[in-house]
Image: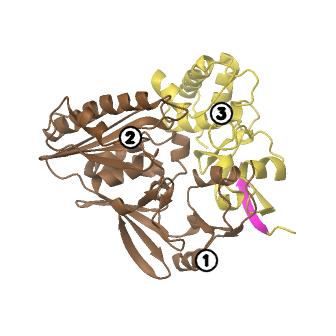
C-alpha cells in the first residue's frame, strides 16, 4: 500500500508544468489526488513522474456569468458546492456535487480532476455530458476545448493527450424555462452510487444521464416519451451490468425507478413547480 | 539504486519541520514516521476509513491521500494539536470522554479532527447534521450512537465555553 517511486515536479508556472509533462510521456498530473493517490498506493498506476499543479497560480477560480460556470483545475469540489452563484446559474452542478464522495474528500478533490479521471461511477462527467459542457486543455502545442461528448473514450480513459493538462471545465447555464434534477441510490450517502440519474428538461427536449450504469457516462434522449414509459425507454438504450455491489437486475430496476422519478422532477421544475 | 529525496517544510500544529523525503512519502507516513506524531492513525490507506484525517488549513482531508511534498506551505493540524493550550481537553475530546465515544480508539483521531472542523463551521448542528458530519469516518467498535452523542455534547460544551476557533 505504498506508491512505487516516481520523479516529482512542482512547477510554479503553467508553462513549466506543460514542459515537464511534455518531456515525459509516462508522467501524470497531480491535482487533488483523491483518485490518483489510491491508484498509486495500490500500484494500479505507476507513472514515471508526477507533475503537481497545486502550486500553479490562477487555476482555482470559479467564474460565473449568464452563459455558464467555468471551473478552474484547482477549484475543490467543496468550493464549487459552496458557491451560491454556481447554484443559481447551473443548479445541476450543485445538486450532483452534494453526492460526490464525503465532505472530507470534497475538501481536496477537484471537479476538473474528476472529469478527466473519466470514471463512469463519478457524478460530474455525467453532468458535463448531459449539459453539453466542455473541458479546456493546454499543452506546449497550444490550447483546445474538448466537448463532453468527446471527452471519455472508455473506462478511466479520457481523450486528453499525454502532454495535455485540463485547465478548466465549462458547464453551460440552465436556460430560462428549463429544469434539472439529480438523485442516486448508494449503500450509504457518499459511497459510489449503485445507480445515479441526472435529468434535464428544456421545452420539448428531455434527457437523462446515468452514473454507474455502463462503462462510460451515458446520456439517453427521452424527448417525447410520456411519463410512466421513460424508465423502460431508458433501459432499452442501456445495458446495466452486475458487480459486487448490485446485480444487473437490481441495477435495471434502479434505472426504471430513478428515471421516472428524476425526469418527472426535472419536468416539474421546468414548469416552475419545482 | 537511491531514490531522489526532496526538501519539504511542513507546518504541523504551529511548528515548522524540515524533512528530506522521497516524493512518494504519504503525508500520513511523514507525520508518523518522520515527525513521530503517531496520533494520526493509518487504517485503510486508500481514503475510505477516515482514521488518518487531519486538518489542512483548517479543512479535514485524508492524510493518506496526500503526498508530504504536496503539503508544503500549508498548515497541518493533527490530533496532537487539538487540545487546549493549558493541556486540558478540547470540547470535542471532552464530549468523547463523557459520552463513551470511543472504545479501542483507533479511529478516534480522525473523528476528532473531522468534528473539530465540523463544529467550527456549524456550532449548532441538528441530530441529522451530526450524523452527516461523521459520515466519512468508520468506527468498528461503537456502533456510532455514542459518537453522535459526543458530537452533540461537544456542541453543547461549545455554547457554554466557546473556544478560539484555531
Furthest residue toward right: B1
Q: Which residue is depicted at the point 54% across and 33% down?
A: B119
A16 up-or-down from B158: above or below: below
Chain B, chosen colour in render: yellow
Q: Which chain did the renderer colour brown?
A: A
Residue at label 1?
A20
- Evaluate whether label 1 is on the same chain as label 2: yes
Q: Quadrant of the N terminus of chain B?
A: bottom right
> Residue A47's x, y, as percent?
66, 64
Q: CA distance from mark 3 to mark 1?
A: 40 Å
Q: In the visual, does A223 lie left or right of A28? A: left
Determine contact: label 2, label 3, CB under 8 Å: no
Q: Quadrant of the C terminus of chain B?
A: top right
Task: Please tell me whether mark 1 sits on a helix, a strand or a loop.
Answer: helix
Instruction: Tell me, yes or no, if residue A63 can be seen here.
Output: no
Furthest residue toward bottom: A141
Q: Which color scheme is applied?
A: by chain
> Residue B128's x, y, as percent?
46, 24
Identify the chain of the residue marked 1, using the numbered disc in the image.
A
Q: CA distance from mark 2 to mark 3?
A: 43 Å
Q: Which mark is residue A239?
A: 2
> Residue A180's x, y, as percent?
25, 43
Find out whether residue A90 is within the magenta segment: no
Q: Nearer the viewer, residue A39 or B44?
A: A39
Q: Which mark is residue B112?
A: 3
Amino acid at each position: 500500500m505504498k506508491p512505487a517511486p516516481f520523479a516529482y515536479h512542482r512547477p510554479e508556472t503553467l508553462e513549466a508544468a506543460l514542459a515537464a509533462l511534455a518531456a515525459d510521456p509516462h508522467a501524470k498530473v497531480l491535482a487533488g489526488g483523491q483518485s490518483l493517490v489510491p491508484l498509486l498506493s495500490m500500484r494500479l498506476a505507476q507513472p514515471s513522474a508526477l507533475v503537481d499543479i497545486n502550486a500553479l497560480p490562477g487555476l482555482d477560480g470559479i467564474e460565473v456569468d449568464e452563459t455558464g460556470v467555468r471551473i478552474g483545475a484547482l477549484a475543490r469540489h467543496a468550493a464549487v458546492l459552496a458557491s451560491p452563484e454556481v447554484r443559481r446559474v447551473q443548479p445541476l452542478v450543485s445538486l450532483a456535487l452534494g453526492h460526490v464522495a464525503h465532505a472530507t474528500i470534497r475538501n481536496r478533490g477537484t471537479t476538473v480532476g474528476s472529469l478527466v479521471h473519466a470514471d463512469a461511477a463519478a457524478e460530474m462527467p455525467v453532468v458535463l455530458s448531459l449539459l453539453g459542457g466542455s473541458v479546456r486543455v493546454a499543452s506546449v502545442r497550444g490550447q483546445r476545448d474538448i466537448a463532453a461528448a468527446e471527452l471519455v473514450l472508455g473506462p478511466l480513459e479520457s481523450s486528453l493527450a499525454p502532454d495535455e493538462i485540463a485547465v478548466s471545465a465549462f458547464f453551460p447555464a440552465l436556460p430560462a424555462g428549463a429544469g434539472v434534477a439529480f438523485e442516486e441510490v448508494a449503500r450509504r450517502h457518499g459511497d459510489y452510487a449503485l445507480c445515479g440519474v441526472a435529468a434535464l428538461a428544456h421545452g420539448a427536449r428531455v434527457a437523462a444521464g446515468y452514473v454507474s450504469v455502463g462503462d462510460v457516462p451515458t446520456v439517453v434522449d427521452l424527448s417525447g416519451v410520456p411519463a410512466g414509459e421513460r424508465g423502460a425507454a431508458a433501459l432499452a438504450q442501456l445495458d446495466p451490468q452486475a458487480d459486487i455491489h448490485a446485480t444487473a437486475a437490481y441495477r435495471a430496476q434502479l434505472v426504471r425507478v430513478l428515471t421516472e422519478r428524476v425526469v418527472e422532477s426535472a419536468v416539474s421544475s421546468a414548469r416552475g413547480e419545482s | 539504486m537511491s531514490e531522489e529525496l526532496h526538501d519539504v517544510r511542513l507546518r504541523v500544529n504551529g511548528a515548522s519541520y524540515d524533512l528530506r523525503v522521497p516524493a512518494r512519502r504519504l503525508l500520513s507516513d511523514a507525520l508518523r514516521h518522520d515527525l513521530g506524531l503517531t496520533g494520526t492513525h493509518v487504517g485503510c490507506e486508500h481514503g475510505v476509513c477516515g482514521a488518518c484525517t487531519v486538518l489542512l488549513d483548517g479543512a479535514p482531508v485524508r492524510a493518506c491521500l496526500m503526498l508530504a511534498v504536496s503539503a508544503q506551505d500549508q498548515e497541518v493540524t493533527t490530533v496532537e494539536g487539538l487540545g487546549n493550550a493549558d493541556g486540558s481537553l478540547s470540547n470535542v475530546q471532552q464530549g468523547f470522554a463523557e459520552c463513551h465515544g470511543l472504545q479501542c480508539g483507533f479511529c478516534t483521531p480522525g473523528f476528532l479532527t473531522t468534528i473539530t472542523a465540523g463544529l467550527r463551521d456549524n456550532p449548532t448542528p441538528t441530530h441529522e447534521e451530526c450524523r452527516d458530519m461523521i459520515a466519512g469516518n468508520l468506527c468498528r467498535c461503537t456502533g456510532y450512537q455514542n459518537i453522535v452523542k459526543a458530537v452533540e455534547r461537544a456542541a453543547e460544551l461549545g455554547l457554554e465555553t466557546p473556544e478560539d476557533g484555531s
